């Protein structure tokens, strides 16, 4: 159970690492490079989501294709933010986040597994940005970082316990890995930005 959880977290980190490393290649061309990379990640997001929606794939594959779709969609949003096409943390971005979050909650039980994982990864990243941005503005970095640490550590321990209790169900373990990954990301990014 714990091994599967760690393996999933490692795979998530590898996917994010590959997306981040790719940004460095396109960064050389400035705004045009970001726009090209945004287009590439948009296409990748759509392609992986279409693979995840293929019901002939095993559930675990559907979930992973959804995760990759959500990560690519988030990377596309980050690139659009970099060139000023989209605001993800301030004003309108926060309202759009709330709207997408509420619509997702309403439709959740009717969504295919790939979309559940994809939208969750997308919203986790977006929500994390808003929390860090708003938290820095309201609390300051010195007070925000310890608060993020405490909440993230509670999430990590809770998900480890959940993974043990569910007895190694691959989908449940993947959900736990997703939550652990975002908690670790919040600890890291609350220090960087």
Image (tube, helix red, strand yellow):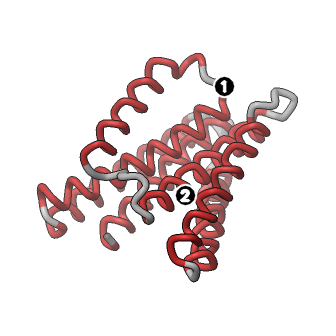
Outermost residue, bottom direction?
28
Give the residue pinned by disc 2: 75
38 in relation to 93, above or below: below
Give the residue pinned by disc 1: 112
Residue 187 in the image, given as x and y percentages of width and height: 36, 63
Residue 170 in the image, given as x and y percentages of width and height: 69, 39
Q: Nearer the viewer, residue 96 or 9?
A: 96
Alpha carbon of mark 1 to alpha carbon of mark 2: how far?
Answer: 22 Å
Q: Earlier in the sequence, mark 1 or mark 2?
A: 2
Other-residue count near label 1 (Cα within 10 Å), few / some / many at <14 / 14–19 / ≥20: some
- Element under label 2? helix
Q: Quadrant of residue 109?
A: top right
Q: Is residue 166 left or right of residue 125?
A: right
Outermost residue, front direction?
32
Q: Quadrant of residue 20?
A: bottom right
Q: Is residue 107 left or right of residue 86?
A: right
Q: Residue at x 74, y 39 (%)?
A: 60
- Element under label 1? loop
Other-residue count near label 2 (Cα within 10 Å), few / some / many at <14 / 14–19 / ≥20: many
Q: Quadrant of residue 113?
A: top right
Label annotation for residue 185: none
Residue 110 in the image, given as x and y percentages of width and height: 59, 17
Q: Nearer the viewer, residue 99 or 57?
A: 99
Q: Nearer the viewer, residue 15 or 72?
A: 72
Q: Residue at x 31, y 65 (%)?
A: 190
Outermost residue, right direction?
56
Q: Nearer the viewer, mark 1 or mark 2?
A: 2
Q: Residue at x 51, y 45 (%)?
A: 122
119 in relation to 87, above or below: above
Residue 70 in the image, given as x and y percentages of width and height: 59, 46
């Amino acid at each position: 159970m714990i091994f599967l959880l760690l393996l999933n977290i490692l795979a998530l980190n590898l996917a994010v690492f590959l997306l981040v490393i790719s940004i460095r290649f396109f960064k050389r061309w400035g705004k045009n490079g970001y726009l090209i990379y945004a287009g590439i990640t948009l296409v990748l997001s759509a392609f992986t989501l279409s693979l995840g929606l293929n019901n002939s794939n095993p559930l675990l594959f559907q979930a992973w294709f959804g995760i990759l779709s959500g990560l690519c969609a988030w990377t596309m949003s980050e690139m659009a933010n970099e060139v000023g096409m989209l605001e993800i943390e301030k004003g309108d971005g926060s309202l759009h986040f709330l709207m997408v979050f509420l619509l997702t909650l309403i439709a959740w039980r009717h969504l295919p597994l790939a979309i559940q994982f994809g939208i969750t990864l997308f919203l986790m990243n977006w929500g994390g940005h808003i929390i860090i941005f708003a938290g820095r503005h309201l609390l300051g970095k010195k007070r925000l970082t310890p608060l993020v640490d405490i909440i993230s550590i509670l999430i990590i321990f809770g998900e480890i316990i959940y993974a043990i209790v569910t007895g190694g169900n691959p989908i449940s373990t993947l959900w736990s890995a997703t939550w652990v990954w975002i908690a670790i990301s919040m600890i890291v990014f609350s220090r960087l930005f």
